[in-house]
Amino acid sequence: RTTDGRDIAVVQIAGLIARRIVCSVREGETLGAGERFGIIRFGSRTDVYLPEGVVPTVLVGQTMIGGETILADLNA
C-alpha cells in the first residue's frame, strides 16, 4: 500500500521448466521502496499491478533489475 492508501500488487509466476521462486515475505506485509522480497529464476516472471491512473516508466519487454529499475512514478 502506498503512503496515500493505494494498493500495489505483485505476483511471482513460476516458469514451465525450472519453476524456481523464492519469496521471503508474506501476503499483506509492508515493504519500502527498493526493498527485495524474493528471487525468481530460469524463465519465471513477476507481474506488478499498479493503481489506476499510474503510468509505467518502463517498456514492455525491457529488462529490469530488482531494487534499481524504477517501474512507475506514483506521484505523477
Image (spheres, rainbow, N blue to C red):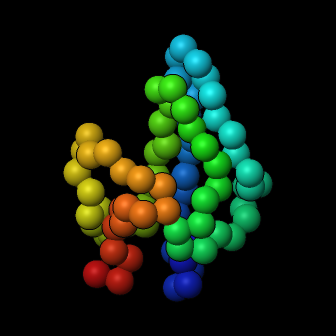
Look at the image and tell me in which quarter the C terminus lies.
Answer: bottom left
Residue 15 in sight from this viewpoint: yes
Look at the image and tell me in which quarter the N terminus lies.
Answer: bottom right
Q: Is residue 29 above or below residue 47?
A: below
62 or 52: nearer the eye? 62
Residue 37 image point, x, y percent:
64, 55
Which residue is pictured at 48% across the width and 55% down the height?
A: 66
Which residue is pictured at 52% across the width and 85% down the height?
A: 4
* In the displayed structure image, the side of residue 57 where residue 26 appears, left or right: right
Residue 71 image point, x, y percent:
36, 62
Residue 15 image point, x, y percent:
52, 23
Which residue is pictured at 61% across the width and 43% down the height?
A: 39
Residue 7 in sight from this viewpoint: no
Q: Is residue 46 above or below residue 16?
A: below
Tag count in the figure?
0
Residue 51 image point, x, y percent:
43, 66
27 or 39: nearer the eye? 39
Q: Is residue 67 above or below residue 61?
A: below
Find the residue positioned furthest to the top: 17
* In the displayed structure image, the side of residue 75 where residue 38 appears, left or right: right
Q: Is residue 21 above or below residue 69?
A: above
Which residue is pictured at 38% across the width and 76% down the height?
A: 74
Asked which quadrant contains residue 68, the reply is bottom left
Asked which quadrant contains residue 25, the reply is bottom right
